[in-house]
Image (tube, rainbow, N blue to C red):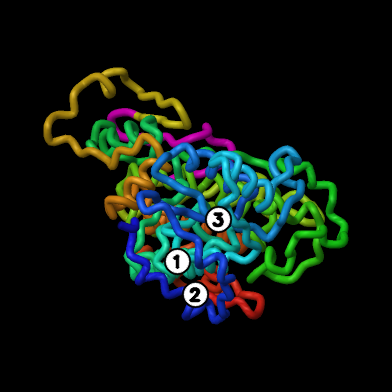
């Protein structure tokens, strides 16, 4: 018996995003193991390859395909060589055969009837189009953070996932770290008293992860790299090594800098602790940022902003705050970062919460949680609506930094009040022929 019925797999026949999907006959003839969650990876650069190694450890999973617009090349973490061919070889070596297929166009991979789920590890500006197409194709999705490039993209993604009824896991793996869960449970159980302030510390700068920051002059596109497809809906710009690879996150056409890259993690924990997974702040104030000159990179290197919640809580996010998340209440404080946490009084951790204590969703392994949910059809620890609400704060902060104005935000309607210019920045125009629909 197949893992899931393929009757929902109509993508190859109907196409998606207004484009026909041409799928080779030999691809459709591949048969998936009946007792496995079959998965394809879209984006096999940094996070894609790293997370694929984790998925390969789960014996319930079978990786059948990999997709990347780059056949093979440098520019990734520490100048390493990655792409679809290195990823395909990695999979084949793991299984001891040559069953993994490589694709340059994600639509061909989505057209496979024998794939149950996909992983999205592309640059941020591609997340929405791929996720929406995958949801319509009935694929379960493990989608990397930051969820989307804009607020409007995030809303479209969340709606598409809800409509399709698929399983979604955001790559916000801090929700599978017990340190963050313990601290958030202290907040939810009122162990710190009424929370008046949440402090979120994010990294500063624009690190040269790919060792390409100096390579800003236009160059010929490397052989095997479909640069036009890499740009996709983003504005047309000449190819330069500094623009692509891991350093894409410092270019506002493709990402939101440290504010969205790390904000998608720590702001997510702030929201989780405050119980705001389905909502958010009502105002962004006192936004200040530093933008260092660079021929290609234009995201903020330092920043500060405050959020006001309807319940009176204030969130302070800055590159000068202690890294991680601190919840400050009337009766104490609690701080969490990856692999550790601290509290203002030891008794907060040793005193029992009681039989009626609130317990947050417990996950000890982010990939395992996703695979479990694909089989059980139950929600994951990091659902898409929560990810959308969390990264919306980062997007609003970037808008406030660029406009230099405070923003009044309605989390119910997801609109900015009284500022047409700022409201226009909730979305981005797409380069033809791509459309958000």
At mark 2, the secondary structure is helix
For disc 2, the marked residue is 12
Magenta stretch contains residue 304: no
Which residue is at a point 52% across and 54% down the rendered structure image?
64
Q: From the viewer's perspective, is residue 38 above or below residue 340?
A: below
Question: Is 261 placed left or right of 181 in the picture?
Answer: right
Question: Is 431 placed left or right of 357 in the picture?
Answer: right
Mark 3 or mark 1, earlier in chain: 3
> Between residues 166 and 390, which one lies in front from this camera angle?
166
Magenta stretch contains residue 316: yes
Q: What stretch is highlighted in magenta?
A: 315-332
Count of numbered badges drawn on the protein: 3
For disc 1, the marked residue is 113
Do the residues under discs 1 and 2 have CB atoms within 8 angstroms? yes
How far is the residue under mark 3 from the one under mark 1? 12 Å
Classify mark 1: residues with Cα within 10 Å, few (<14), some (14-19) or many (20+): many
Which residue is at a point 33% across and 37% down the rendered structure image?
184
């Amino acid at each position: 018996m197949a893992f899931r019925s393929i009757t929902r797999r109509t993508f190859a026949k109907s196409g998606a995003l207004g484009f026909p999907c041409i799928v080779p006959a030999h691809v459709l003839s591949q048969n998936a193991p009946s007792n496995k969650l079959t998965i394809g990876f879209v984006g096999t650069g940094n996070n894609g390859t790293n997370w694929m190694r984790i998925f390969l450890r789960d014996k319930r999973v079978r990786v059948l395909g990999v997709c990347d617009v780059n056949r093979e090349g440098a520019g990734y973490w520490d100048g390493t060589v990655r792409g679809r061919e290195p990823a395909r070889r990695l999979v084949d070596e793991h299984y001891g055969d040559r069953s993994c297929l490589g694709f340059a166009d994600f639509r061909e991979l989505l057209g496979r009837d024998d794939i149950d789920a996909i992983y999205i590890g592309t640059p941020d500006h591609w997340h929405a189009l791929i996720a929406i197409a995958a949801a319509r194709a009935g694929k379960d999705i493990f989608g990397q953070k930051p969820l989307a490039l804009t607020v409007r993209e995030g809303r479209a993604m969340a709606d598409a996932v809800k409509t399709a009824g698929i399983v979604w896991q955001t790559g916000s793996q801090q929700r599978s770290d017990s340190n963050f869960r313990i601290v958030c449970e202290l907040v939810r159980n009122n162990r710190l008293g009424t929370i008046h302030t949440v402090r979120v510390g994010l990294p500063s700068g624009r690190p040269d992860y790919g060792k390409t920051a100096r390579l800003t002059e236009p160059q010929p596109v490397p052989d095997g790299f479909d640069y036009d497809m890499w740009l996709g809906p983003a504005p047309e710009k000449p190819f330069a090594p500094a623009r692509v690879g891991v350093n894409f996150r410092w270019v506002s056409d493709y990402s939101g800098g440290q504010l969205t890259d790390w904000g998608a993690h720590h702001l997510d924990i702030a929201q989780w602790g405050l119980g705001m997974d389905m909502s958010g702040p009502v105002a962004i104030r006192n936004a200040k940022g530093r933008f260092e000159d660079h021929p290609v990179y234009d995201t903020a290197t330092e920043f500060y902003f405050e959020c006001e919640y309807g319940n009176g809580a204030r969130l302070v996010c800055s590159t000068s705050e202690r890294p991680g998340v601190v919840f400050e209440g009337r009766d104490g404080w609690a701080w969490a970062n990856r692999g550790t946490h601290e509290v203002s009084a030891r008794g907060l951790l040793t005193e029992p919460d009681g039989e009626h204590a609130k317990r947050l969703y417990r996950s000890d392994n982010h990939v395992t949680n996703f695979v479990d949910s694909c089989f059980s059809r139950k929600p994951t620890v990091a659902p898409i609506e929560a990810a959308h609400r969390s990264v919306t704060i980062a997007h609003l902060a970037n808008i406030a930094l660029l406009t230099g104005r405070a923003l009044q935000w309605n989390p119910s309607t997801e609109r900015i009040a009284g500022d047409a210019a700022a409201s226009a920045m909730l979305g981005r125009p797409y380069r033809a022929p791509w459309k958000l629909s």
